[in-house]
């Protein structure tokens, strides 16, 4: 384990057992993340990316190995590892403001006064440009706006590690690009440590400091780690013509489509079994 | 349950527009009247007319509406008279029934939501209790009356018990389905922000299950109003059910028809009250 690692995943194995059949999903996952680093996990669907994230979040318990965040072992979910869900997961009966306030009030009950908490909620919603829709219900705003609120809710908990589970997966391409830029801007300001799951190669190269590429399941593990040495702030337009950018893109693509070519029937079965195990 | 809202047809603009257009609010009110108030008025009027014609034939068994109004005018005009004993106005009769329903239904709401949460949360409780619920909920309301009379030795608590036992099942079952259908994402949100048990119950579980709970409450209030009339026919005393039975025994058919009308209106209002409450609580996410 690296001493200056802020988030450290060491020797994580994950096996879902259903009845008598054991289904190894992850094997020997080792990853050290520095403070303020933006890490992307990329891999084919069914390779266990989400399982890694859920273990870091504390929502799943690893079969072996452990996760340490800022010197403390993870054994339950908590606001220090706030999660942005793929489908936003806003509570539909609460307004935009109330959704964020629920998390803020609970997290900072002891440390901030009611007025400070209110200001903090507004501040975070302003940061994702949602200050104009405080009293709307989730059903009344677009998918991109919902995801902004989901990001504001996670940021408002001042997490040590921000976990993004395919945060832009359900959005159309234009909205996605816009939100990616916003996340880059916010990350530039706050210097959060971020772990993001994605299967979008451009998104991974554009946003990350390092891309962690996972092999196919069952018993998936980390195949390669690619350092992205592009200076920030990054501009998608300028980069699209940049030789280094295209080189990184090519490296990820070749990992995904040559070295880890997807064997369809096998992976699909593994994913189905993993999903069954999750829902059981 | 859907309301009687009709789909508004797309109309062509009338070529000859009125020279002085009506103010906007007035026009909207007029259109609302045309689309929502007029159809039920026309249909009700037609049915009343048919009834009037059938009832006025010589030898008709049931009185026509005109005769009903004429014979029950005293009851309609003074709903709040009180001559002591059972001889009180129809409003008092209805209020007495409503009071019984209020007691029985309140108990059913408390027990139903409580048991529903238990069964929704615990698979063990579900397996243990569900067969019991499924069998008991098919027992007709009146079948409970003799056994509750035997148990309570008194009419008043027996009627309340019958209301309770009739309306509690849909509340239990719907609540438990609502709890079981809470998306995992909401649970995960609650785990990440570390809500404790009580906070989870109040902030996530109840609101998430509220649409289901309220559809159970709505079915429940309807059933309890169905049961009260039948129960009161048997236990006697003041109450709209006994009023109907009493009218039948003294051959006051017009009184029965008036009472049926009142029972229908009150049942409709009860249903709408619970639906309105549900809409308020669930902020329109309820299917009500």
Image: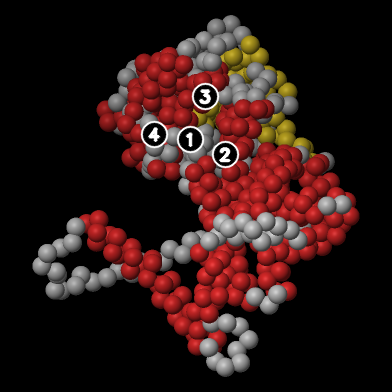
The first of marks 1 and 3 along the sequence is: 1
Question: Closer to the camera, A177 or A223?
Answer: A177
Looking at the image, is B65 positioned above or below residue A257?
A: below
Tell me the residue at 54%/68% (across/down): B74
| Label 1 crowd bin: few (<14), some (14–19), many (20+), radius 10 Å | many
Q: CA distance from mark 2 to mark 3?
A: 16 Å
The picture places residue A47, in percent across and down from the top left corner, at 60, 36
Establish whether labels 4 and 1 are both on one chain: yes
Label 1 sits on residue: A94
Q: Is residue A232 visible?
A: yes
Judge depth for marks 2 and 3 and give the one in front.
Answer: 2
Tell me the residue at 39%/43% (across/down): A140
The picture places residue B190, in percent across and down from the top left corner, at 59, 29
Label 4 sits on residue: A135
Tag 3's secondary structure?
A: helix
Tell me the residue at 81%/41% (across/down): B124
Which mark, residue A246?
none
Tag 4's secondary structure?
A: loop
């Amino acid at each position: 384990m690296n001493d200056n690692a802020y988030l450290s995943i060491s020797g994580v194995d994950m096996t879902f057992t259903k009845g008598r059949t054991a289904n190894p999903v992850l094997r020997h996952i080792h990853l050290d993340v520095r403070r303020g680093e933006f890490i992307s996990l990329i891999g084919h669907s069914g390779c266990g990316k989400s399982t890694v994230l859920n273990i870091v979040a504390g929502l799943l318990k690893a079969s072996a190995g452990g996760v340490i965040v800022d010197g403390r072992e993870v054994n339950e979910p908590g606001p220090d590892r706030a999660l942005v869900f793929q489908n936003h997961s806003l509570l539909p009966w609460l307004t935009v403001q109330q959704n964020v306030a629920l998390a803020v009030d609970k997290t900072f009950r002891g440390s901030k006064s009611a007025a400070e908490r209110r200001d903090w909620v507004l501040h975070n919603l302003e940061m994702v440009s949602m200050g104009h829709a405080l009293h709307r219900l989730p059903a009344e705003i677009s998918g991109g706006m919902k995801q902004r609120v989901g990001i504001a809710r996670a940021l408002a908990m001042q997490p040590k590690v921000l976990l993004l589970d395919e945060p832009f997966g359900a959005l159309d391409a234009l909205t996605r690009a816009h939100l990616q830029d916003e996340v880059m801007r916010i990350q530039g300001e706050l210097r959060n440590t971020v772990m993001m799951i994605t299967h979008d190669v451009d998104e991974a190269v554009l946003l990350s400091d390092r891309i962690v590429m996972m092999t196919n399941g069952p018993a998936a593990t980390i195949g390669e780690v690619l350092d992205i040495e592009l200076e920030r702030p990054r501009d998608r337009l300028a980069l699209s013509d940049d030789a280094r950018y295209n080189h990184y893109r090519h490296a990820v693509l070749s990992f995904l489509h040559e070295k880890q070519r997807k064997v369809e029937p096998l992976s699909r079965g593994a994913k189905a079994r993993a999903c069954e195990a999750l829902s059981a | 349950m859907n309301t009687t809202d009709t789909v508004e047809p797309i109309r062509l603009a009338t070529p000859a527009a009125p020279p002085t257009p009506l103010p906007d609010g007035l026009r909207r009110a007029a259109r609302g009247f045309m689309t929502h108030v007029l159809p039920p008025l026309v249909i009700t009027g037609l049915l009343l007319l048919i009834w009037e014609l059938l009832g006025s034939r010589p030898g008709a068994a049931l009185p026509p509406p005109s005769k009903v109004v004429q014979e029950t005018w005293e009851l309609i005009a003074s709903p709040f008279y009180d001559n002591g004993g059972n001889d009180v106005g129809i409003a008092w009769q209805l209020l007495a029934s409503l009071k019984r329903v209020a007691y029985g239904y309140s108990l059913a709401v408390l027990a139903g939501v409580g048991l529903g949460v238990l069964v929704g949360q615990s698979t063990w409780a579900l397996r243990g209790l569900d067969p019991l619920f499924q069998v008991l909920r098919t027992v007709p309301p009146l079948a409970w009356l003799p056994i509750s009379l035997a148990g309570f030795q008194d009419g008043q608590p027996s009627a309340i018990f019958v209301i309770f036992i009739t309306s509690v099942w849909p509340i239990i079952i719907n609540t438990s389905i609502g709890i079981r259908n809470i998306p995992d994402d909401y649970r995960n949100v609650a785990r990440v922000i570390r809500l404790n048990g009580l906070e989870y119950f109040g902030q996530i579980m109840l609101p998430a299950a509220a649409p289901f709970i309220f559809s159970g409450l709505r079915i429940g209030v309807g059933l309890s109003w169905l049961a009260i009339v039948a129960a009161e026919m048997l236990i006697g005393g003041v109450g709209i059910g006994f009023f109907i039975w009493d009218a039948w025994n003294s051959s006051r058919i017009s009184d029965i028809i008036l009472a049926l009308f009142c029972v229908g209106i009150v049942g409709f209002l009860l249903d709408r009250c619970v639906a309105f409450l549900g809409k308020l609580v669930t902020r329109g996410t309820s299917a009500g």
